Image (tube, rainbow, N blue to C red):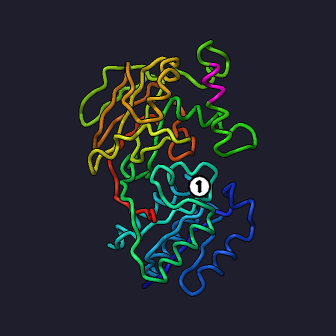
Amino acid sequence: MAGIAVISNPHSRRNLKNPVISEEMRALLGSDGIVIETQSVAEIPHAIEQCLQRGVDILAINGGDGTLHYVTTKLAPMYAEAGRELPLIALLRGGTMNTISKGMKTLSGSPLHILGRIVDKYRRDERFFVAERHALDLNNGEQLGFLFGIGLPASFLQAYYQGESRGPLKGAYVLGRLVLSTPVWGKYAQRVFHRVRAFVAAGGEESPYENYTAIFASTVTEIGLGFELFSRTLEKDGHFLLLGGALSPVSYVAQLARIYTGETLKGAMFDRVTTDAVIELEGEYPYMFDGDVKTGITTFRLRCGPKLRFIQK
């Protein structure tokens, strides 16, 4: 057995509350692994190179959704270039929302608790149960991730990131304000909902709509707060779910129960399980990828990327 490597983001919200977490993890691992702290995204390739050199069996990621996004973007191509099989991935839930790990039903608890369970099972040479998920490949490998969105998903996160508080309670607060504001078209709803003009196609089929309130693509089932909007994404291996919503803001609020359970939304919705998609924006709008809100791209070419194996138990 070649051991366990932990790539730890000391700047994630949860890790900031425990500045000695890396030392605690090293003590927990003992001779069975290493902990690599990355102070910036630029240090991630060097951390992955250490994993390659050691031939680790398990890569544990201690950070939030954004940390997973940046590690995955470098991990898959570096291992492919080296001709090596990707290690098992353990998500230690070191963020505040941990939407991706929840969407994959991976181990829950604190980072130290999760790592402890993995180390114990590893030392006893027990089999891990895994969830296999494809990453979304954006623009030929420029970025890899699992949950992508334009319009409502990006602006919702922008509202969520305002102020200092984070976590599920903050997410529920933003959702609650939006639900109350939307029927009367209040200022909060106007700030979060806006139309995006775009050309959208999936698997070569063009969407009939031009103005969208939300565009999503995902290889995980959950959008956050327990809402299983993307339950159909697992229908076919090597596919992902694309949703192009031209619905009115009120229609989203009226269908919250359907969003929660993963039922198909009614109304102006381009809904496809596909291997590839193209989104061309008329103008520049913020987009969201694994919890990070970004700008600077107007053409998005999405396809099903590499398959990764995540430890569930």
Closer to us: 160 or 296: 160
Q: Is residue 179 magenta?
A: yes
Q: Quadrant of the N terminus?
A: bottom left
Can you give x and y, in whole percent of width and height, for residue 145 in the image?
A: 45, 51
Residue drawn 67% across the image and 41% down it: 169
Can you give x and y, in whole percent of width and height, for residue 160 in the image?
A: 65, 37
Residue drawn 62% across the image and 79% down it: 28
Splitting the image into 4 quarters, where does residue 245 fall?
top left
Specify the principal SS of the magenta part. helix
Residue at the far left in the pictured view: 204
Horizontally, is 182 left or right of 242 in the view?
right
Residue type at mark 1: give it. Answer: Gly
Residue drawn 74% across the image and 71% down it: 20
Residue position marked by numbered label 1 in the rendering? 64
Can you give x and y, in whole percent of width and height, for residue 75 in the image?
A: 44, 64
Neighbour tally class for label 1: few under 14, some 14-19, many 20 plus, Cα within 10 Å = many
Q: Is residue 269 magenta?
A: no
Closer to us: 181 or 192: 181
Region in magenta: 176-181
